[in-house]
Image (cartoon, rainbow, N blue to C red):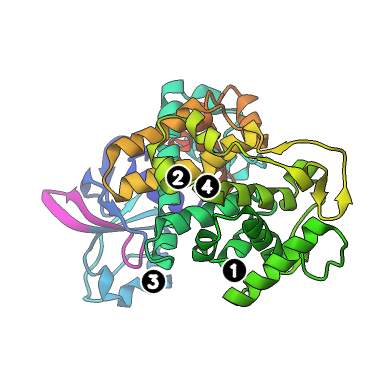
Amino acid sequence: MNEDFLHHLWLYKLYQSGLHTTTKGEPIEFIHPGYHNTDAGPDFFNAKVKIGNTLWAGNIEIHQKSSDWFKHGHHTNKAFNNVILHVVINHDAVATTANGTTVSTWIMNIPPQLIHNYEQLKESRHKIPCIHKIHQVDALTVNSWLERMMVEKLETKVDLIQKLLKHYNNDWDEVLYVLLVRNFGFGLNADPFEQMARQTPWRIILKNSDELLRLEALFMGQAGFLTGLVTEDAYIRSLQKEYHHLKQKYGLTPMPAYHWKFLRLRPSNFPTIRLMQLASLFHNHRLSLDKIMKASNTQQLAAMLNVSLKDYWLTHYRPEVLSPQKAKSIGRRSCELIIINTLVPLAYAYGMLRDNEKLKNQSIQWLESLAPEENAIVRQWENHAVKADAAFQSQALIHLTQKYCRPKRCLHCRIGHLIIASHQSFN
């Protein structure tokens, strides 16, 4: 049992009900638990407690043992002079402040079932600790919490976009460029894609967007796929020639090709193919911030992403490696993932930072109109009767699992709170 658990019990008044007294036998009434402090100092600020006939306003400190007051040095710390109540589980010392005041102590009794529920969640080996108990939480609460998770996830993305805007001098187009290129790595190659984007400034892409061959040379060369390649292939040699010129002109540095991962990828997901698709997307401003903001539905967004490689790339997945002829377009699921992970957060951030509620609502509607993602996390929840009907819910479930379930932040989760607070057994 840790102090985070005790803080949770105090904040939500989950201790044993009934009449309460201090260790000196004085009647005590809890008016307001105060405001949880996560920084240095007492655990709760501005609480209100009535002890005897006196109403006290001040701070609360909570420990498992009252002797921890001295162990933590609070008796010499002036920041604890305004503590009006010391809440403990075991009383083995009387707390005193730096100004010599004796602090009233109250022993908090915890219902055994709450301890049992909490320990079950903390000791669970499942990636989703409450997965076998969640069916006992009403669907309205679960859905409400998932809505909160989706908003929280979007707000996290807004924080990231704000940092990128600061780094790129508030250039929204460059932020779109960096985010899009990173997400074309689809997880496995996300980092090398982002590295390539950061080494290939947006202004250079913009200046050469009218010529597809130049963009292909830029992306392929900056990714390191043209370095040291000796070939008689006319197309690859033209890419090398273009890249050599651009490299000298802009002082570019290619990244090592070994950063890229091909193993266990379908050929259509090879980074070489994704790079060429990016070149097509940025050619002649096919995809731009202005077009994204003006889209009224996800069909229009998907149409912007609908590129298919031609000529050389019909029969190649990698330079000089011949393959059977096949069209290499961005698939439907890939398009949807790009919309979910790039275009929606960007539109939401733009709406939030520009006070445009219509754009914020529209970006959420985009999520609600897309099919849910298909991955291990979503399947786990679905196997236990929590089904994602759209990308809105699947994104919420992913955020909940990654940020709350896996680190076992059950005390900060509304679902976890209800399971812990229940006086019934959740076996």
> Which label's residue is closer to the chain start, 4 or 2?
2
Q: Which residue is mark 1?
A: 199
Residue 426: name its quadrant: top right
For the point 43% across and 71% down, which residue is it?
71
Residue count near mark 4 (Cα–Cα under 10 Å), binned few <14, some 14–19, many ≥20: some
Quarter placement of the C terminus: top right
> Which label's residue is closer to the chain start, 1 or 2?
1
Of residue 205 and residue 23, the one placed in the foreground of this image is 205
Tag 4: amino acid: Lys
> Left or right: 21 with respect to 203?
left
Q: Which residue is mark 2?
A: 345
Tag 2: amino acid: Pro
Give the vertical position of 72 relative to 233 (above or below): below
> Which label's residue is closer to the chain start, 4 or 1?
1
Of helix, strand and loop, which one carries label 2? helix
> Which label's residue is closer to the chain start, 3 or 4?
3
Of helix, strand and loop, which one carries label 3? helix
Q: Which residue is mark 4?
A: 403
> Left or right: 335 with respect to 361?
right
Which contiguous range is marked in magenta?
39-58
For the point 62% across and 44% down, which residue is it?
123
